[in-house]
Amino acid sequence: MDQETYVPRHIEDVEIQEWLESLDSVLLSSGAEVAREIMERLRAHATVSGIDLPFSANTPYANTIPARLEPLFPGDQQLERRIKSLIRWNALAMVVRANRLEHNIGGHISTYASAATLYEVGFNHFFRARSDSFEGDTVYFQGHAAPGIYARAFLEGRLTVQQLVNFRRELKPGGGLSSYPHPWLMPDLWEFPTVSMGLSPLMAIYQARFNRYLENRGLKPATDAKVWAFLGDGETDEPESLGAITLASREKLDNLIFVVNCNLQRLDGPVRGNGQIIQELESAFRGAGWNVIKILWGSEWDPIIERDTEGLLVKRMGEMVDGEYQKLVVSSGAYIRQFFFGSDPRLLKLVDPLPDEALRRLRLGGHDPRKVYAAYKAAFEHKGRPTVILARTIKGYGLGEAGEGKNVTHQQKKLNEDELREFRSRFGIPLSDQDVNELPFYRPAEDSEEMHYLKARREALGGYIPQRKVRSAPLVADHDELFKEFFEGSEGREVSTTMAFVGMLRKMLKDREIGKLVVPIVPDEARTFGMESLFRTVGIYSSVGQKYEPVDVNTLLYYKEAKNGQILEEGITEAGSMASFIAAGSAYATHGINTIPFFIYYSMFGFQRIADFIWAAADMRTRGFLLGGTAGRTTLAGEGLQHQDGNSHVLALPVPNLRAYDPAYAYEIAVILQDGIRRMYKDGENIFYYITVMNEPYAMPAMPAGAKEGILKGMYKFRPAPERKAKLRAQLFGSGAILNEVLRAQEILDQKFGVAADVWSVTSYKNLYTDGIEVERWNRLHPDETPRVPYVTQCLDGEQGVLVAASDYLKVLPSMISKWAPRRLAALGTDGFGRSEGRESLRDFFEVDSRFIVVATLHELAQDGLVGEATVQNAIKELNINPDKPNPVTS
Ligand SMILES: Cc1ncc(C[n+]2csc(CCOP(=O)(O)OP(=O)(O)O)c2C)c(N)n1
Ligand SMILES: [Mg+2]
């Protein structure tokens, strides 16, 4: 057919009517599924017939669940409202009181005020607690809504008045409450730190996926437990928030529910003043394959919407930008009538019967428990896809003049007496005008209807949440046998520490006790680290197994995906891998399973890129091992400025419960791993590990006797000077692959310059530093007791000679321990941008090779007047060093 021959014509109303009626009749006789199938077929038919249908991931600006399909609300709405009102009050009182007691202590009222119904419907009907017989639902609470969660825990009898009074003043006698969810600070209550926005949505996705991983690997039974993540609409601007949503749909995570509190505002103002954040999010999530449920309008709108047979109202709703919607929130009923409905006389007619005040009271969907319940139920029952609920609310709901819908509302934390009274009356809090200004926390009598109801609901759902508990039993074995072989050295065979680590990993995977608990995590770098043999032996986790014959099926190490595969091959996402690490490393609490994650990645893309996740992991008491692969600014050759890592050991310093090691030899790694497993999984310490591993091959020596303690503490003497009677003496410190340069320097110094140098392996500057500051602190606070001695000082006591340290990281690492050394310490390191070069050139460029170590040693001796300057001068010449070479720090 030639389309050109058609003359465009007006579509007759009856024609449209016929189509609509036939769809209605299908819907009535055969249901939504059949109707959908017909629509899909029609769409396909239209496409093959050459009709160009516009793509739209959006549905109209209307509730996804129409009123007629709403389930019955199973609770007592009146009672639930009274309970919710008390929680609202206590949350508000807590923040306002804290700010009266301590000016500017902060806290948030308006976030919870907008989200109260979203949480309360969850607490009363959906969130199931963890118990011995059921793993429970996992809930990520929006960080800034914490006051509401505390206020509920107070009603539940789980927090005291004292604690509420001390909100944000945790150090006061009797204890207080942390500003936001922090398991480190409140380990019995909070499970997940959520306040750095964007982290929790991504963590929730990987948590839901990890739950499936545990099921598919037979580590826990399959259940219908859900992961709920509550986020702000402004929060979705963080790239992490939406960054992994396709993983959730790809993995068919119908155990995952996002609830986005769409109050259309963030901190400064509207999220999308000139657009519609809800529609934007809908298309992003639908496009990614999620089930999207919008709850935009409350029940009061239903009869109006029903009267609108022409669809004009939905059209008008879809035209308004969020800035206009926000304006309606702060406007009178008359304004709403004129501005919103007044755009079309037919719309005005729809609200004719309603007085202005009723127009002001038209609730939004997110404040209507019936709508919220309907959405949660649909999300709970949805199969095959994750669900996101986009709930429209008002920021600062109920604050009235004090901030409802206003741009300043996010920061409102002080209400005057009138505003408090208004809030009290609005929510029917039984407090007199006099009392209200004192901001008492209100808890109904134990035998009141409210308390009975509240407790009965939680009992029915298995107990209280949030609640954090260590659920796993400690490991029992000591794993001596497992690690023994690595203490023995490679007998001259050249291997890298990465290879050595992979060897240990392979062995751990076979261990009777920990084998099944090991979770190797890798972001598309397994081949780089020589881990591909594990593909075949333990398999790559895939929730669908392997639907294809891998291209390399005929090889020994083929790419094997399996439903019970053990490796989490995450693809190129350090953030996602870290989220898996967190899920696996906190399963000892979440699931009572001691999974031991080993997340190995390109070291430069760790702390540098995902430090905030690492900080959250620390807060969460996550256990496990982070392995920075291809580490060392000069050890990773060729890759240049963006890849060569001389930073991560400095960036690891701030994380208090992280133990960071830069080991040189296989036995050092073995000692650290064995001890780490013991400390974390047997003794239950809340620490985790960062270990750098390199790709430079060299012979691995056997462990010197008595080295274990020093390896773990941070330094030990690896090779004493060959000639101990020499007059010129030095103590040299090396770490990681640079230790070999130090050993070469030791030889040159001995043979060419008559300097006897002892060589120390410094496995952890962080440990030495932590020990030093702790000893200093103790001595400062205990002046009357025998002073303690830092470990560095103990080690160097009586050791003679000048001190020179070299590492593949910034010079600040050795420098920060120099104050506990008996003398000056010269530090060589790799400050500056990397270069694309070979190892030798890089070590020359950064001045950390054996020649520079020799020169630094001689220079130190010259400073002490033990050799002449000419000796240094000669050495520079003899070792072929260009003294006017570019400065690596600034070039
Ligand atoms: C990564 C990060 N950046 C900035 C902040 C500071 N901050 C706290 S709340 C907020 C606005 C939140 O808006 P939204 O996500 O819409 O939450 P609402 O309070 O509106 O529910 C900002 C910018 C933060 N907590 N985390
Ligand atoms: Mg918001």
Image: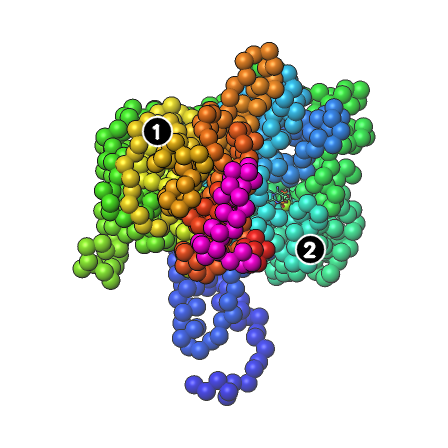
Above or below residue 730? Residue 798 is: above
Q: How many marks?
A: 2
Residue 488 in the figure: left or right of residue 522:
left
User: Which residue bears the numbered disc 1?
Assistant: 708
Query: Where is ligand 1, by quadrant?
Result: top right
Q: Can residue 177 be seen at all in this image of the molecule?
A: yes
- Rendered residue at 41%/37% (across/down): 757
Quick one: 726 or 215, which is closer to the camera? 726
**Residue 143 placement (x, y as % from top left):** 58, 37
Determine whether the residue tagged by mark 2 lies in a helix, strand or loop.
Answer: loop
- Rendered residue at 35%/50% (across/down): 696
Magenta residue span: 858-885
User: Which residue bears the numbered disc 2?
Assistant: 273
Q: Amino acid at mark 2?
A: Gly
Reply yes or no: does residue 881 show up in magenta.
Answer: yes
Occupied quadrant, residue 727: top left
Occupied quadrant, residue 624: top left
